């Protein structure tokens, strides 16, 4: 299994980038440039990662493919095409985005129509169009599960995979995003097993965060936090992840300080060592 996260150290060359990743204890990386970079730059980073035995885990799109504004929606689709092409060119494990929202103000925000048949059908048709445009053979297009849009359950994710019906469409897992109630919070070990049991070989990338239920706020308030400082059952999370492909990546995200990444990496590597799992 591979492990990675953000790199805070400044670098001037691809070799300095990979050295910084190794110093953080990473065996996987987020690709550091997008599709607008010159091909020579992209090639240099791909070569550096290969030479350092670092897996390029994922390339992000991070825009709204269901934007209610038609112009913005087509602009988002154009970027998605280019980013998926970049993932294919670099041989990244996957290219990831959220499914999309009808929220006109937040590209990843909630909206009452996000859980409708219309939303499901729009996601399917958009995903098919994207994959049919790029025709990837080496990478996969994946949707990160979210608390207020599809896919929000393992069953929904499977339904999307079946409906899209494309070999290049797979799954991304961020278990913290789908723990959106006290009931799921307290049974998160079982929730983790349910997602892995349902999606298994479809999973191409895994995000590593933690979650804590605030006891001093009404109504329900769940906060993201550094791995090891919340309630997520990391033993189960890592045990399940370790049974997948050896190049599957567990990737830290969403923290703003390098020290938090260092502490999070130490915690996750410690749990993995206790389980006899190599990262």
Image: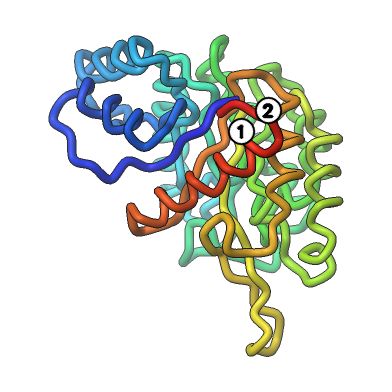
Q: Position of residue 224 (x, y in %)?
A: 56, 64
Q: Position of residue 217 (x, y in %)?
A: 64, 88
- Quadrant of the rendered structure where residue 21 is? top left
31 or 129: nearer the eye? 31
Q: Is any part of residue 119 visible from this angle?
A: no
Looking at the image, which residue is at 66% across and 41% down? Answer: 173
Query: Which mark is on residue 166?
Result: none
Horizontally, is 278 left or right of 59 in the view?
right
56 or 122: nearer the eye? 56
Q: In the rendered image, which residue does mark 2 sit on?
A: 170
Contact check, label 1 and label 2, Cβ < 8 Å: yes
Horizontally, is 207 left or right of 34 in the view?
right
Looking at the image, which residue is at 57% across and 63% down? Answer: 229
Q: Position of residue 161 (x, y in %)?
A: 76, 30
* Other residues around mark 1 within 10 Å, as few (<14) / some (14–19) / many (≥20): many
Looking at the image, which residue is at 46% across and 45% down? Answer: 62
**The residue positioned farthest toward the left in the image shown:** 12
Alpha carbon separation for disc pair 1 and 2: 5 Å
* Disc 2, SS: strand
Q: Position of residue 74 (x, y in %)?
A: 45, 41
Horizontally, is 170 left or right of 78 in the view?
right
Q: Is residue 75 above or below residue 57?
A: below
- Quadrant of the rendered structure where residue 200 is? top right
Query: Which mark is on residue 142?
Result: 1
**Quadrant of the drawing holding the C terminus:** top right
Q: Is residue 164 above or below residue 6?
A: above
**Quadrant of the drawing holding the N terminus:** top right
- Quadrant of the rendered structure where residue 181 is? bottom right
194 or 86: nearer the eye? 194
Q: Is any part of residue 165 visible from this angle?
A: yes
């Amino acid at each position: 299994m591979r492990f990675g996260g953000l790199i805070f150290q400044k670098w001037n060359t691809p070799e300095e980038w990979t050295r910084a990743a190794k110093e953080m204890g990473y065996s996987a990386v987020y690709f550091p440039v997008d599709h607008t970079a010159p091909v020579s730059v992209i090639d240099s980073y791909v070569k550096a990662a290969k030479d350092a035995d670092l897996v390029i885990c994922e390339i992000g799109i991070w825009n709204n493919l269901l934007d209610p504004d038609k112009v913005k929606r087509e602009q988002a689709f154009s970027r998605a095409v280019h980013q998926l092409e970049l993932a294919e060119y670099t041989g990244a494990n996957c290219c990831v985005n959220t499914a999309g929202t009808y929220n006109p103000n937040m590209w990843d925000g909630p909206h009452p129509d996000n859980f409708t048949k219309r939303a499901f059908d729009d996601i399917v048709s958009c995903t098919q169009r994207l994959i049919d445009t790029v025709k990837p053979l080496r990478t996969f297009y994946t949707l990160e599960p979210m608390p207020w849009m599809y896919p929000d359950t393992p069953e929904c994710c499977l339904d999307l995979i079946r409906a899209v019906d494309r070999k290049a469409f797979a799954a991304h897992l961020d278990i913290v995003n789908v723990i959106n109630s006290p009931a799921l919070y307290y049974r998160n070990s079982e929730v983790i097993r349910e997602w892995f049991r349902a999606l298994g070989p479809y999973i191409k990338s895994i995000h590593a965060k933690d979650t804590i239920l605030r006891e001093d706020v009404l109504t329900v308030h769940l906060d993201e936090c550094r791995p090891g400082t919340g309630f997520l059952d990391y033993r189960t999370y890592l045990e399940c992840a370790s049974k997948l492909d050896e190049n599957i990546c567990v990737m830290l995200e969403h923290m703003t300080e390098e020290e938090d990444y260092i502490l999070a990496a130490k915690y996750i590597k410690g749990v993995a060592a206790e389980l006899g799992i190599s990262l």
